[in-house]
Each structure stands twice: as structure tokens, then as C-alpha cells.
Image: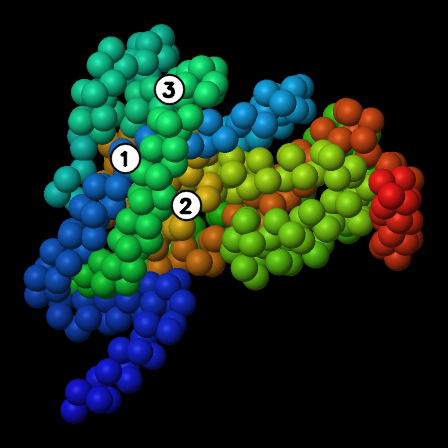
Amino acid sequence: MLAPLGRLWKLWMSIPLWLQILVGMVLGIGAGLALGDQATYLKPIGTLFVNTIKMLIVPLVFCSLIVGVTSMQDTARMGRIGFKSFGFYLGTTSIAISVGLLVGYIMKPGAGVHITAEHAVAKVQQAPSVMDTLINIVPTNPVAALANGQILQVIVFAVALGIALVLIGDHGKPAVRLFESLAEAMYKLTDMVMKGAPYGVFGLMAWVAGEYGIEMLMPLIKVIIAVYIGCILHVVGFYSLILKVFAGLCPLQFFKGISNAMAVAFTTSSSAGSLPASMKCASEYLGVNKKISSFVLPLGTTINMDGTALYQGVTALFVAQAFGIDLTWVDYLTIILTATLASIGTAGVPGAGLVMLTLVLTTVGLPLEGVALIAGIDRILDMARTVVNVSGDLVATTVIAKSENELDEEHYNADMEQSVLIAEQNEAAENSAAG
């Protein structure tokens, strides 16, 4: 009896996590429809998972942001290239989440769901002014901000502390190593918690399906459509505009050149895993000097989260609409600020999309039970948002290379076969000069 169960367990553990979560979602829906109101007894499994995610948020964001900022020491050495890269990535991230919010506002994927949550935070009747919002993001007591989970204040303090550690040079290195060690521990803990996601999603989806029936599934299809529409608009529309206006380059030629990297990003759902393909596209097809691409692309893998930010906008509005919570314009501003600032340090975290979603939901007082609704379709959304992330890295690399006169436009405008030939000739010339 135990041997078949052991083999079944080994088979289960060999399945990719995203597929386990999807299976957990399907089984949870089935259990909820079968059990009806009795499915409430399964909800504590999901609540336990939500609590473990809450446990991660503050230390994960704090440590990873400090590590993200202190890794920018290359920015000082690279001078204006580093500042251009940093500004470009943060600027496009804020635009991306605005696009996501706009798409979510227009399409209203969560309208008509009407889910209630025990821990939903009541929205304040009187919205604070912009000045109050900006003043309040600076903590008067950083320890209290950490203890109370004031996410924006934690982000601002972490960024400020990271900058200070860079500025004091060698004196800051012991502290940087400490935070790097803590960040690695938090990444591992996040990985451990995410292994429990299939069971947490099972419990919450069983409760939702038992309480609200099969109707709640239709909005998930609208979420997928909304995220993909937003991603297409951002890549084809916004990135094309940047290439044309700021670099005077043909967008069609650019997308031909990065098609391989986009395919790798879509299939692997990993910005870091797509980095070799991105480096190859930049040098072989776009004509970007390796001095630029070798710095800007890895930096983008660390801090550029355009696709994830766009996803945050759509899914945050979905959760708000599903739970019947009206967001004020200050909430929208807070979502933009949170996702943009958090993008500095959380891009390399396993399960970054879901972790960042819990961060955004917490910041504006939305119930974290909404994470379970998104988790089952997260892999489908992850494929699209990774394509946006990788495309954004390559747009930044190309535009910055053009501004530094490090872009070979003849190479850029050549067809694919000619591009490879030019790249080989350039590499041979560099090797000859080095020899």
C-alpha cells in the first residue's frame, strides 16, 4: 500500500510547481462544487498559506531592495550609462503599471463576482491628499514601519539605507554582505513557501467555489485577456514609440531582431533564463556594442519589471472589483509608486509576480485571498509578462547604445543573415586587436 503512494508522491513532486498550482486550483473548484457550504472547512488550509505569504512580505522586500540598490555600484563606475539605465527602467515600469490599471479599469474583469473576505480592510471615506500621501511615505520611525508592515515606508527606508551603504564604500561592505546573506535566506524561504501554494490554492478555491459557485470562473478568462491586451499595447505601442521618437529607429526591424529572445522568454517564463538569448540578439541582430549590452541587460534583469508591473495593475483592479472595494485615485497613485519602487529589488525572486501582487494588495488594503484566484492562472500570465520584461530590457539597451554612439545602425538595419555575418566580422576584428 505504501509503495504505490510513495511512487505517486514522487510523480507529484516531479511536476513543475505552476502545474501543481493549476491542479490544486482545478481540484479545489471540484471539491468546492461537490461540498457546497461544507467547503468552508477547507478554507483554513488556504488561510494558512496566505499567512505565510504575509510573513514574507516585509523582510523579503527590505532585504532584497537593499541588495538591489547596493548592487548598483556598477552605476557609479559606468557613470551616465548607469543613470540612464536606472531612470529608463523605473520610468517604463511606472508607465507599464499605468497601462495595466487603465486596461483593468476599462475591461473590469472582476465586475459582478461579489466575493466577501473576512480580513478585507475598509476603505476610508475621505481620501488623503497627494501631499499627505507623499509626506507619509517617509517613516518617522523605520522600526515601527517594519513592525506595522507600512510597505511604502519600508521601501523608502530600504532604498535610502542601500544608497548610504554604497556611499560609505568599504565601511558598508560588512553590512552589505549581511543583507545579501539575509536576502538569499528570504529567497529560499519564499521558495519553501511557494511549494505550499498548490495546497493553499486548493483550500481557498474550494471555499470560493462552494460559496459562490461556478460563475466566479468566467472573470479569470477576462483577466487573462486583459493582461495579454495590456502586454501587446505596451510592447507594440509604447516600445515602438520610444524606439521611433528617442532613437529614430525602425520598430519592425527591432522586433525581428529580438524574436528569438521573445520566444525564449515566452516558453521559459524567466527573465534571467532569457539573458543569454537577449545578449545574443543585442550583439548579433541589433548591432549593440557589448560594452553597453553587458551592463544594461543584466541590470534590466535585476530591476526592470514592466510586464510584472502591468500584471499588478490588472490583477489589483480585478481583486478590488471582485471583492466590491472601490479604489480612490490616491490608491491608484499608491499602486504605481509601490510597484515602481519595489521593482528595484524583487525581480530575481522565485514567484516574483505573486509575491509582488501580495505587496501591492497589502499596500492599498485589498484582501490577500485574491491571490488564490490569480495563482491558478499565474503561469499563463507569467509567459506574457516575461516577454514584456525581456523586450523592455532590449529596448533600453538599444536606445542607450544609440545615445552613446555605440549602436551600429548599418548592422541594426541589415537582414538576419547579414547581421550574423557583420557580428562575426566585428568579433574577429576585436579578437585580432586584442591579440
- Of residue 35 and residue 161, the one placed in the foreground of this image is 161
Pinpoint residue 254: horizontal percent, then vertical percent.
77, 44
Q: Residue at x 48, y 48 (%)?
A: 226
Disc nearer the start of the sequence (2/3): 3
Q: For the residue labelled by badge 3, is the local secondary structure a helix, a strand or a loop?
A: helix
Residue type marked 1: Pro
Residue receiving disc 2: 349
Quarter residue 405 falls in: top right
Q: Quadrant of the N terminus?
A: bottom left
Residue receiving disc 1: 59
- Of residue 394 and residue 218, the one placed in the foreground of this image is 394
Q: Is residue 291 left or right of residue 108?
A: right
Q: Are marks 2 and 3 in contact (CB under 8 Å)?
A: no
- Of residue 216 and residue 86, the one placed in the foreground of this image is 86
Tag shown at residue 161: 3
- Of residue 141 and residue 181, the one placed in the foreground of this image is 181
Quarter residue 377 falls in: bottom left
Residue that lies at the very extreme toward the bottom in this rendered image: 1
